[in-house]
Amino acid sequence: MIDRNASQASFWNTKVGHAAMASIAAMVMMIALSSQLQPSAANAAPLAPANAVIEIA
C-alpha cells in the first residue's frame, strides 16, 4: 500500500510541486480579485437612448 503522507510531502518539495503551489495561488488570487471587479448596472453605459428605435436589417 502507498504511504500517502510521504508521497505528498515529497511532491510539494520538488520544483514541480513549487510551481503547482504558485499556480494554485495565482488562480485563487485571480478569482478573488476578479470577483470584486464586476460592473454593476448603475455603472453600465446604455446601448441606446430609451426612446430610440433600432432596426436590424
Image (cartoon, rainbow, N blue to C red):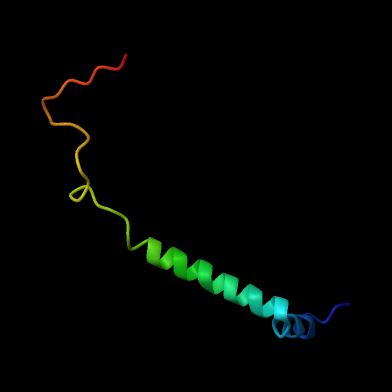
Judged from this view, the residue extending furthest toward the front is 57
Q: Residue at x 28, y 53 (%)?
A: 39
Residue 3: image location, x then y, percent = 82, 82
Q: Is residue 6 left or right of residue 17?
A: right
- Whether residue 24 is situated above or below residue 47 in the rendered picture: below
Quadrant where the C terminus sits is top left
Q: Is residue 52 left or right of residue 32?
A: left
Residue 19: image location, x then y, percent = 65, 75
Q: Is residue 5 left or right of residue 28?
A: right
- Whether residue 55 is situated above or below residue 39 in the rendered picture: above
Q: Is residue 18 left or right of residue 7?
A: left
- Whether residue 12 is situated above or below residue 36 in the rendered picture: below
Q: Residue at x 65, y 73 (%)?
A: 20
Quadrant where the N terminus sits is bottom right
Judged from this view, the residue extending furthest toward the top is 57
- Of 8 and 19, the residue lying toward us: 19
Q: Give the quadrant of residue 37.
A: bottom left
